[in-house]
Amino acid sequence: MEKDQNQENTKKTIEKNQKDLNQDQKTENLETRDNEQDQKQESTPEEKILELEDKLARSFAEMENQRRRFEKEKEDAFEYGGFSFAREALNLIDNLERSKQILSNDEALKNTDALKKTLQHFDIINKDLISIFSKNKIKPIDSLNKKLDPNFHQAMIEIEDDQKEPGTIIQEIQKGFTIKDRLLRPALVGVAKKSENKVEKNEENKQNSENK
């Protein structure tokens, strides 16, 4: 009876050892597989260097783009920072021109020395203002006898003139200005158009030609 018990204990011990051995082998296999996967996922030194170089190049490119944007914004602020002030300052020229017209049309002042001296002073002030504007790259727009350009001129009225080609600027109502390469204020102008009589006559001649 004791012998059978010993054999049973021995069998259980062997089975336990075998089970432990199998478990250890399974654990070792799992660890080996995990290590192999980690090795496969881990980049080589050359790949890591290429990856770092790519990230560095992208960072430098982004920094350069930001620097260019900053330089452009700074340049615009410097070049056109006085845009609003310059546009308001044009009112000085407008007021001078209106004052000249009012005084020149005043019957009580016509042909007087006082009017001549006043207009001379106005001309001096106007030239000084234009000179200051010119130094700051603010220039008047040429208008008279030019073809209407919607980028720089705004047509206010049409004037019958058979001597000029239709669309030609023949009157400047308010002078326009540019600041560097930008429009500061468009010129308000009057443009030529054919007289109504001439248009009717042309239509009549056209119909007569077609009837022949």
Image: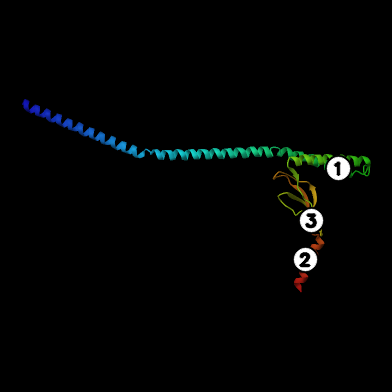
Considering every residue shown, the one lying at the far top of the view is 2
Would you say 26 lies left or right of 105 here? left
* Quarter of the rendering containing residue 7: top left
Q: In the picture, which quadrant includes the C terminus?
A: bottom right
Residue name at image x 26 percent, y 36 percent: 29
Considering every residue shown, the one lying at the far left of the view is 1
- Residue to which mark 2 is pinned: 203
- Residue to which mark 3 is pinned: 192
Contact flag, marks 2 and 3 (Cβ < 8 Å): no
Q: Amino acid at mark 1?
A: Lys
Please state which of residues 54 and 186 is positioned toward the viewer in this rendering: 54
Q: Secondary structure at mark 1?
A: helix
Q: Amino acid at mark 3?
A: Ala
Disc number lying in front (1 or 2) = 1
* Quarter of the rendering containing residue 21: top left
Image position of 7 with respect to 174: above or below: above
Earlier residue among tags 2 and 3: 3
- Residue to which mark 1 is pinned: 100
Residue 166: give x, y in percent of width and height.
77, 58
Q: Amino acid at mark 2?
A: Glu
Contact flag, marks 3 and 1 (Cβ < 8 Å): no
Earlier residue among tags 3 and 1: 1
Disc number lying in front (2 or 3) = 3
Residue name at image x 23 percent, y 32 percent: 24
Residue 100: give x, y in percent of width and height.
86, 42
Q: Secondary structure at mark 2?
A: helix
Neighbor class of circle 1 (other Cα within 10 Å; few <14, some 14-19, many 20+) is: some
Earlier residue among tags 1 and 2: 1
